Amino acid sequence: MKRIPVIFLALALVLPLSAAVEEDHDHDHPETARVTADPAERIHSLEVDYEIHRDGVVTFEQRFQLGVAGVAIRRGPVLNYLTVFQGPGGLVLDTELEILEVTRDGTSESFRADYQSGFLALYIGDKDRDLEHRSHDYVIKGRMREDWRRGEGEFSTVIDLVGALPTLPIDAAVATVRLPEGVPVLRYTPSVTGVDPEAERHGPAWRAEVAGNRVRVEATAPMGENRSFFLNLAWPSATFATLSALVATTTTGSRFSRAMAIAEASMMRRLRRRTSS
């Protein structure tokens, strides 16, 4: 979740790290190659809501329907969120990401938030229970501190809408971002990759609409497992909190690069694992 000029490159490097789709409950088995998912194991639909608050807090809700066939998904999915980004003066800042609630099929679901260097691994499900082979509806609610870039009279950010999710095909995805009442959307640019090239013959595979303080974006074609979906957004900075409210974890750009390299390497090691049968 770095907000620097090379944000798209940095996030593109991280997206493939979400390859683990099955929960590693025990952490005591050797690393193995990634299991090939059953075709039924996919994200049938995804709805994401973000709300940006004046005090620098961002609340979010992810709702997705996940197909389970007992091959790559047995007990529950794993989601991986980056939690550091580069702030003013090369400071490495932490988003203080917090998972507030997880439900499955309308009922509270067990989960474990594992905070690592630069990212959070969210393990969903019970290690002593295999899921039924069918579609399951998940809802994840959370909040974090802002990670905005400040320009002349405005804030801007790039929101990664699907990078935390398991690397499975996504049949449909829509996201809504809300600003405080009375704060207009100045600019927005969606970006979608991983769709069938035929779907982009007549333009980008997304559509968007803006109404006052709200922007809604939707992918207009299914996305494969190697995909991305971003929203670049800008709005007036007046009356908002500044980046100084965030916690600095180091002070140099070089340390930031090393911190991100360590985070990505750690995620890669963890995500090459899968649960034993």
Image (cartoon, helix red, strand yellow):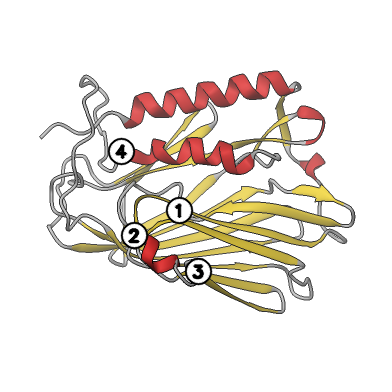
N-term mark: 4 or 2: 4
Residue that carries the numbered disc 1 in the rendered image? 162
N-term mark: 1 or 4: 4
Residue 128's place in the image compared with 102, above or below, is: above
Q: Secondary structure at mark 2?
A: loop
Residue that carries the numbered disc 4 in the rendered image? 20
Q: Is residue 219 left or right of residue 52?
A: left
Q: Are marks 2 and 1 in contact (CB under 8 Å)?
A: yes
Which of discs 4 and 2 lies nearer the camera? The answer is 2
Q: Mark 2 is on which residue type?
A: Ile
Q: Position of residue 208 (x, y in %)?
A: 57, 73
N-term mark: 2 or 1: 1
Which of discs 3 and 2 lies nearer the camera? The answer is 3
Q: Mark 4 is on which residue type?
A: Ala
Q: Secondary structure at mark 1?
A: loop
Residue that carries the numbered disc 2 in the rendered image? 170
N-term mark: 3 or 2: 2
Q: Position of residue 11 (x, y in %)?
A: 54, 41
